[in-house]
Amino acid sequence: MNDTTNNPREHLAAPIRKIGAIAWLRENLFNTWYNSVLTILTLAVLWMIVPPLFSWAFINSLWDSSAEACRDIDGACWSIIPRNVKFIFLGFYPTGQEWRPILAMLLLLGLVFYSKERKRWKKALGWYWSIGLIVMGTLMYGGIFGMPIVEPAQWSGLPLTLMLSFFGIVAAYPLGVLLALGRRSRLPAIKTLCVVYIEMIRGVPLISLLFMSSVMFPLFLPEGVTIDKVLRAQAAIIFFTAAYIAEVVRGGLQAMPRGQYEAADSLGLNYRQTMRLVILPQALKIVIPPSVGILLSAFKDTSLVVIIALYDILKTTKVTLSNPKWTGYSTEAYVFLAVLYFIFCYGMSSYSRRLEKELHTGR
Amino acid sequence: MKLVKLVALTLSLTLMMVGFAYAGKDLDAVKKKGFLQAGVNGGVFGFGMPDEKGVWRGLDVDTARAIAAAIFGDADKIKYTPLTAQQRFTALQSGEIDVLTRNATRTLTRETQLGLNFVTVNYYDGQGFMVPKKLGIKSAKELDGATVCVLPGTTTEQNAADYFRNNNMKMNPVVIESTSELAKTFFAGRCDVLTSDASQLAGTRAIAPNPKDYEILPEIISKEPLAPAVRQGDDNFRDVVDFSVMAMINAEELGITSKNVDQMLKSKDPVIKRFLGVIPGNGKALGLDERWAYNIIKQVGNYGEVFERNVGVNTTLGLKRGLNALWTHGGLMYSVPFK
């Protein structure tokens, strides 16, 4: 007797090979012979890499020990970070005053976080930022409320990285927009000036700009006048980023159909109104993805100040590594830095994606 | 209106960071400023490097502190500017720093074309060789046919090649770009010899899996006299810097240390009395307080103390005095008379 012949077909469970994990595997990983080979090869490679890496990073590793203890283990010596945490993060900031840069950084991150929501983009936000920046500056510099003065030369580590990138980005963006508008201007003098500026800056690498600002520039200053090294590097970063932003924004401006300009003209708007109300809002929206790309690379480029002996977080880590005690643990230190940079960059790029979605008006 | 305010705010913030450092023609300018601006190396352990807490340490740093102690009677009246090799001389020429204590080798062109004035040497360095002990090599003359780990593009590579050629030996260079990679390669046994400045070799040996397995050979094949430097046209200040370094050496010759300097004030020896300013004269001649040398020794120490504290046998670097011993002990450290 065969009962199954009488059962309606639809009551049968689907064959195990058509559903669930196995089916997915067959469908995606073993659907052809070469895919099967590739899958097996990949698994083999993963098997060779992941377990040793895992045991290096987590099982055989030390998280808070002396450098001497690290000599005897095979795994990672993460201790290099906690044992040098003050210098890596804050550099030369005087001991006992650490709360000041920490508070300033928290304030900055808090403000950035608060500004995320577009509905908060109002006049009040501008005031919050102005007050916030003044408070941050006061915290870092001191001089009042019994806080001893800490000169900019001593600002180092993460605060310096954040400062160089934040001001680099914030100041470069408007400058870049102005340059882009200038490059499309009908006034020959302005146009030439902008073209020369943009092409000159884009024609040299950031490293050479930093070198000029730190090595050549002081020789041009009148005798006895010095400008802080940090400020010179900051200016170089701003000028460099602005030139790149300008070209990106120009791309956005050129993508605007003539109709938009003509519509604005026919409404009787003058040049400034046309730009502010019609052209720029649309153009800047189009160029969000490339400008975020530039901002991300500007953030990462701040680490180049290493070569002019500014102690950003990369340099403080490198200095820690030149201590013979810790020299052997460069891998751990650089992995840590990579993670840190990734967190900041990923935050920026995911925010830009959200902004793009929110501003999408379906044009 | 808003824009004007913004511009004004930016300008005033900028001006806050613009310093008017009248690093002038003489000592008085530094005195008026109230602190010494010293250019240092930022990342050479034992010579000039911040520690875990961000406090500057090293032989060069202590030399700068000695100068500050001589001028102000306070070794802490000093600010440090970390400089790269490219920046260091410009920083001095442009007046960004007052004195350069950053393991710079004194050479003829630097002294003449760059307009610098080097003073007494505070560390005699030179290129050397390190070998694994198990090879049983006792002298660099036995290195014929050796594979040599060396950094590319430096005078180090050239010096080593010259040395091998002059001694009719064959050399197989293994050229590796970064210092830490070079060390790892050497410890892994890919080359027989590692060559670099002797002070660097000691630092490299310190990070070996087992430092006792390696030996630095006695031959030094190049001369690297490292000395502090000042700008030209500032002779009084040059003298102050020069004699600050010399005072540390002289104190060691006289057996004065930071521990016993207070008792030494009561010494009957006229040489010591003159040196420490009990018999006045030296201070006035330099334009300093009569206690200037006392302040250096009290706050920083004599040369031997500074050497042992930063790079000596009990530190991670574990350097022997060698050329940097007093002349009375077979070294080159020699002070002119303080009278």
Image: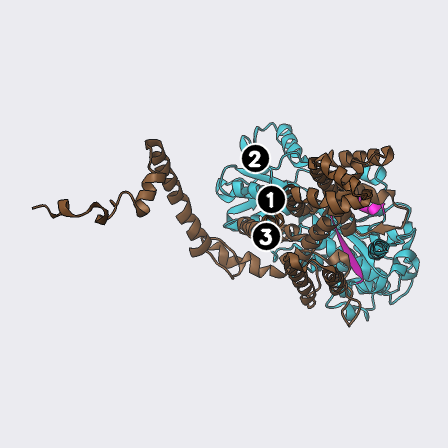
Chain colours: A brown, B cyan
Say the numbered circle drawn on residue B148.
Answer: 2
Which residue is the site of mark 1?
A: A362
Of the residues shown, which amino acid type is indicated by label 3?
Gly
Do the CB atoms of the residues marked 2 and 3 lie less than 8 Å apart? no
The residue that appears at 61% across and 55% down in the rendered structure is: B313
Q: Is residue B64 left or right of residue A294?
A: right
Q: Quadrant of the C terminus of chain B?
A: bottom right
Q: Position of residue A15 (x, y in %)?
A: 24, 44
Q: Is residue B192 visible in this depiction of the protein?
A: yes
State which chain disc 2 sits on: B
Say the numbered circle drawn on residue A347.
Answer: 3
Task: Categorize mark 1 by other alpha carbons within 10 Å: few (<14), some (14-19), many (20+).
Answer: few
Please, what secondary structure does the residue beneath circle 2 have? strand
Of the residues shown, which amino acid type is indicated by label 2?
Val
Task: Check the image and report above or below for B273 versus A326.
Answer: below
Say the numbered circle drawn on residue A90.
Answer: none
Task: Check the image and report above or below for A354 versus A263.
Answer: below
Q: Is residue B82 magenta?
A: yes
Q: Is residue B48 visible in this depiction of the protein?
A: no
Closer mark to the observer between disc 1 and disc 3: 1
Q: Which residues are magenta?
A: B77-94
